[in-house]
Amino acid sequence: MNMNIQDKTGEPRSQEELVEAKVAIMNRLITDIDPIMVYYPTIVDAINELLTLRNRAMAYKHLLQNILAIIHRDGGHYTQAHGIEKSIEDAINKIAEERLQLEIYKSSAKTCR
């Protein structure tokens, strides 16, 4: 239902029509944001929590980018060029390869003694 105070003909809407429109909008809001409202009493509380989560996610993203820059030894250029997903995949492979090389080196050092 339309929330305009006047209908298409320019006549004022009845109080009953306005109340019905408000109820319809409230019902729509409740069904649209119901999962959020289960945990938060007001929209403001939900928005504040989302902003907090966003800030935390941005902080974690920054930490992850720093770790990837250390692994790739490039100041973050590899991640910037290839994206976080590819950078993570390649970092895992790089660490696995370095560990394998270290184990091979340790094994050969033991046999040389």
Image (tube, helix red, strand yellow):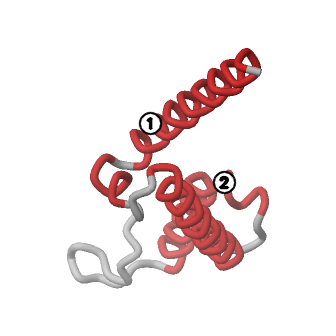
- Residue that lies at the very extreme toward the front in this rendered image: 113
| Of the pair 69 and 105, the residue shown nearer to us | 105
Quadrant location of the C terminus in the rendered image:
top right
Residue denoted by label 1? 90
Q: Name above or below for residue 47 compared with residue 28.
A: below
Q: Is mark 2 on a helix, strand or loop?
A: helix
Q: What element carries label 1?
A: helix
Residue in the image at 53% along x and 66% along y: 62
Mark sitting earlier along the chain (2/1) = 2
Residue denoted by label 2? 34
- Residue that lies at the very extreme toward the top in this rendered image: 111
Q: In the picture provided, is 1 more to the left or to the right than 59? A: left
Residue 26: x percent and y percent? Answer: 59, 65
- Give the residue type at disc 1: Asp
The quadrant in which residue 49 appears is bottom right
Are there few (<14), some (14-19), or many (20+) residues within 10 Å of tag 1?
some
Residue 5: x percent and y percent? Answer: 38, 83
